[in-house]
Amino acid sequence: MTPASGNCVSPLAAVMAVLTCALLRGARAGVVGDFNHVERCKDSLYMGTPPRGYLSNSFTKICQRYEDKPRYVTLYDPRRHIPIYSAYTFKKSDGEKKVDFPWMFEPQLASEKSSSNMESFPQSSSMHMNFEDTQAVLEDYADVVQYERGQLNPDEHQADPLDKASTYSLTNVVPQIREFNIGPWAEHQDLIRKRLNNYCRGKAFVVTGVTTSGHTIRRNNLDRVAVPEYMWLAYCCVEFDQNAPYFVRYKFPVFAAYGLNDRVNNHMVEVPLKNLEKFLKGRMDVDKNFQIFYSDCVPDN
């Protein structure tokens, strides 16, 4: 039977049209309602599941896109202008650090109508005023010699040049005390790089985060960027070298570490995942079910 001509649209067709529009919008969104939408940013998370138990409703989920491809995910605090964590898949790397990439910002934090890709900061600093309410800008870090821009997803843990470039977003950066950044923190990131390079046989998932009590970078007499008190990192690799030496093997499939973001007493402490979660529960606004990896990175089989 031939359908009648005219502009009549069936209810089902109307619903499908709305759903299609919603999916297309979701497919390009950098700032997202959750990480399990159609553009695969959940691939940065073990079992597609983000850390759970954060109590604040003010955090923003960012699928960090660069050159139209999701690279990693970040839970961002637009009030304190820092990421709470970044989660990414580790790529085997020679550890080379690229420093010639421009620093970028996240347009969609300022306006939902903006590009879903991170973009380089405009040359004109007056343009930064258009989005500095929602995120850190280059001026915040310009005159604070005691702090370095510390990447949560470090370029040394990525191999592809575009993946490396995507780590140079200020939405992936927190202020780190210089002595901590170039000392214990850098050394630990390199230790993890070598460990995962040598002994992880499958995909390694990493979550790097902060505790948010601490000092604040001020600019023009305003609180601008929170300085984390502690930095932490946890990795999950369920396919690993079963013949690795015991001193390495017991740190698989999952292990963690934390360190004080300070000039002194800033060594990194390696601990089992449960120990890190217990440590963080006492220092963050999370509930009793706080969990960094789905099922604590214990595979089902």
Image (cartoon, rainbow, N blue to C red):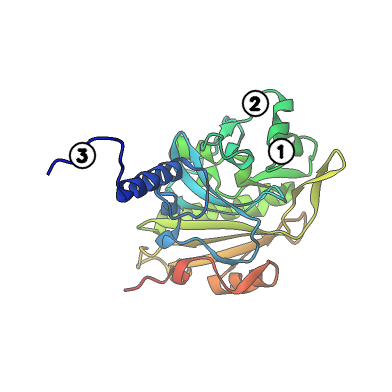
**Could you tell me the amino acid type at mark 3?**
Ala
Residue located beneath label 1 in the image: 132
- Which is more toward the observer, 260 or 283? 283
For residue 161, side relative to residue 264 (left or right): left
N-term-proximal mark, 3 vs 1: 3
Q: Tag 1: residue type?
A: Glu
Tell me the distance, in whole angstroms, between the alpha carbons under discs 1 and 2: 12 Å
Residue type highlighted by circle 2: Pro
Q: In this view, does 248 lie to the left or right of 217?
A: left
Q: How far apart are marks 3 and 1 (CA)?
A: 55 Å
Which is more toward the observer, 296 or 148? 296
- The residue lying toward the viewer, choosing from 163 and 186, is 163
Residue drawn at x 68%, y 43% is 134
Could you classify mark 3 by the number of other residues whose Cα lies within 10 Å: few (under 14), some (14-19), or many (20 or more)? few
- Which quadrant is home to the C terminus? bottom left
Can residue 168 be seen in this snapshot? Answer: no
Residue lying furthest bottom = 288
Q: Does the CB distance between marks 2 and 3 fall below 8 Å?
A: no
Give the answer, above or below, for where 122 lies relative to 75.
above
Residue 159, image x, y percentages: 44, 41
Instruction: Indicate the quadrant containing the N terminus: top left, top right, bottom left or bottom right.
Output: top left
Residue indicated by mark 3: 4
Q: In this view, does 206 lie to the left or right of 17?
A: right
Report the residue marked by disc 2: 122
Secondary structure category for the residue under label 3:
loop
Q: Earlier in the sequence, mark 1 or mark 2?
A: 2
Badge number at residue 176: none
